[in-house]
Image: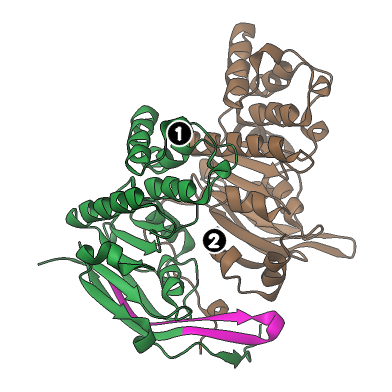
Amino acid sequence: MTQSVLEIRGLEKSFRMHHLDNQLHAFSGIDLELSQGEFVLLKGANGVGKSTMLRTIYRTYLPVAGEVIFHSARGRIDLARAADIDVALLRAEEIGFVTQFLVARPRVAAEEIVAEPLILSGKSRQEAIEKARHWLNVFGVKEKLWRAYPTTFSGGEQQKVNLARALILPRRLLLLDEPTASLDVGARSALVNRLGELKAEGVAMIGVFHHPGDVQELIDRTIDLSVETKPRDMEPLNVAV
Amino acid sequence: MIAPENVKLAAPQFVTTPPVLTMRNMAKVYGDVVAVDNVDVTAYRGEVLGIVGESGSGKSTLLRMMNLEEQPDHGNYKLDIKKDIDNLFELDRFAQRQIQSRHIGIVYQNPHQGLLMKHSSSGNVAERLLIAGERSFAVLREKASDALASSEFPLTRMDAPPIELSGGMQQRVQLAKAIALEPELLLLDEPTTGLDVSVQALVLDTLKRLQQQRKITMVIVSHDLGVIRTMADRVMVMKSGKVVEQGLVDQVFQDPQHPYTQQLVHAKL
């Protein structure tokens, strides 16, 4: 029997905008289960809350209500209410978030950025850099750029660095926020191959893709958020702070 | 509907090691001004805790208390390295200095505060080692040069006094001095304010690298949100001596809950 990785029940998110004295409703009543090696595609029109949902699971956004039960290698934990330090630990070890945007530190070389998760997980610097170069090569970043600072790279090159970093370490759960946007054909197929490998290794994934056709062969289930959630709406903010 | 700030997060479940630093109910009043108003701080091993807030919010006072430079009006301060001492503020000044010099490193915004500007850079670092009882000249020089090298300071200039160095180099000397005794806790008070942008990036990179290699617990105070976003894992937002919000750095910056944090984040260029 495949093991459950994530159980989401009644998840709800809204944003409080104090300067407008309003709150913006994003979604509510989301239920979802995800098992090892399963790939779930989130779909729905722009603004329906697909990326918001990924960020709420990752705890970049604080859920307003509901549970996000994650079956970690360390045990069961509700990500919606977990202590910040536990979430930070799980992000370092088990939960990955892949976006189209690179968060690069200035004056840090591309290969260093990619190698960092491996070094933090305890691998030797040399081994980590070798693996980083391998993945930079797979995603099509030219060798002459490996020692350069990605802050100066084109959008597509930055994204390749970002993907190499995000996928260098197998995770238990991967959240994919439009990782194929602005990638060329070669990098896109390298990404799909890598996601396929990770899926075969048992990594569970939830993804938002602008062109779902890119990952068609990996999709086990599709969830349409336009059906699952009510439309975004503004509500008056009447909670004392 | 439940408001997020009314939702209490659980106690740590997986991180079961005791925090490196625990402060409870810290308070300090200067005349009519409440600088720090019943603040709690917890920092875990190997994490970077950022503290942001406008000038006068109490963030630097809090950092000085962590460095045992400032005695609070009341409050409890415990370091894991001194498990048997329940409150470091109850120790006499001599015992506090011992802990401060051996277990806590600090980098100030102004190098004049942390360095003897006319003594050699290596001498400034060696001073720390002397306090810890090291007396052999050869060992002092070797350890000082190791600390300077780890701070990415060019060793060809190790005998130059800080007064002859650039701002970025002076900060590296402060950093070398701060890490010379391999402290459990490294405190940074606006470490890159006043440096030009390219030097700022180099100093931050050095700090991050050192922190990752040595798994030091770091507390960094800055009014620059970009510095905190680059460096910190968790962040506390202070206003008028109080902590108005705290959380994971991406959450506080992308989904701020408190009106003041929303103002602060939206005001960033």
Q: Quadrant of the N terminus of chain A?
A: bottom left
User: Which amino acid is tagged 2?
Assistant: Asp
Which residue ends up furthest to the left in the rendered image?
A: A1
Q: Where on the picture, by quarter, is residue B13?
A: bottom left
Q: Mark 1 falls within which chain?
A: A
Q: Identify residue for label 1.
A: A146
Q: Nearer the viewer, residue B151 or A169?
A: A169
In the image, is residue A17 part of the stretch drawn in magenta? yes
Could you classify mark 2 by the number of other residues whose Cα lies within 10 Å: few (under 14), some (14-19), or many (20 or more)?
A: some
Residue B43 position, x and y percent, is: 55, 52
Which numbered marker is on residue B234?
A: none
Q: Identify residue for label 2.
A: B250
Residue A53 located left or right of residue A214: right
Residue B86 position, x and y percent, is: 57, 51
Dot 2: what SS? Answer: helix
Residue A86 position, x and y percent, is: 42, 59
The tint of chain B in the picture is brown
Q: Where on the picture, by quarter, is residue B153?
A: top right
User: Which amino acid is tagged 1?
Assistant: Trp
Give the magenta range.
A5-26
The residue that appears at 41% across and 54% down in the rendered structure is A183
Gap between marks 2 and 1 measured at Cα: 27 Å
Pointer 2 and pointer 1: residues touching (CB < 8 Å)?
no
**Discs 2/1, front:** 1
- Dominant SS of magenta comes to strand
The tint of chain A in the picture is green
Q: Nearer the viewer, residue B238 or A123?
A: A123
Which residue ends up furthest to the front in the rendered image?
A: A185
Dot 1: what SS? Answer: loop
Can residue B167 be seen here? The reply is yes
Q: Mark 2 falls within which chain?
A: B
Could you classify mark 1 by the number of other residues whose Cα lies within 10 Å: few (under 14), some (14-19), or many (20 or more)?
A: many
